[in-house]
Amino acid sequence: MSYATLRLYFENPVGRLLEQPVGQYVVVQYRSGPRKLPELQAFLTHAGQLLSRQGWHKLLGDQRLMDPFTAEEVQWEPRIGSRVRSGVPVSSTGPCCSPTTSSPGSPLVKC
């Protein structure tokens, strides 16, 4: 997938958020390397704000370059805590996402 034609909404050291107006979804493109928790929090907050502002409900997560979540990030991850408190079960693949890998080594996640 080429991201060259998509509109850049937000970018920080964690990654980039791109708008796909035709399909009405957000592309969440993570960068490689270590992250700071406040940067990840800002990144995911902006993703939520974009979805809300546009009235969209879909994400396409490109995690191919992303380092694994740290223990601190997993503990903070807001969707898990809020879903557990609201009584919504959390799936084994994540709080709202399921992997849609087309081939080994290309972990694209669609929410």
Image (spheres, rainbow, N blue to C red):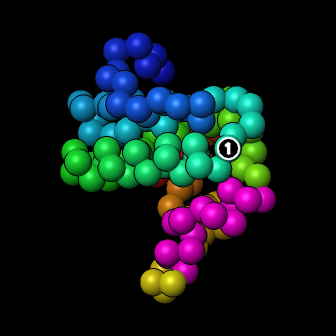
Tell me: residue 33, above or below residue 73: above
Assign the magenta stretch its main secondary structure: helix
Q: Can residue 103 be seen by looking at this rendering?
A: no
Tell me: residue 53, above or below residue 22: below
Q: Position of residue 5 (x, y in %)?
A: 34, 15
Residue 52 in magenta stretch: no
Mark 1 Cα-neighbour bin, 10 Å: few <14, some 14–19, many ≥20: few
Task: Please state if 56 lies on the left or on the right of 83 as rendered.
Answer: left
**At x 35% / y 31%, what residue is drawn?**
9
Q: Can residue 47 be seen by looking at this rendering?
A: yes
Tell me: residue 92, above or below residue 13: below
Residue 77 in magenta stretch: yes
Q: Position of residue 46 (x, y in %)?
A: 40, 45
Task: Please state if 41 lies on the left or on the right of 53 as rendered.
Answer: right
In what element is the residue under mark 1?
Answer: loop
Tell me: residue 70, above or below residue 31: below
Q: Which residue is mark 1?
A: 36
Q: Position of residue 42 (x, y in %)?
A: 49, 46
Q: Position of residue 38 (x, y in %)?
A: 59, 49
Question: Which segment did they paint magenta?
Answer: 71-84
In the image, farthest residue toward the top: 4
Task: Please state if 39 lies on the left or on the right of 25 as rendered.
Answer: right
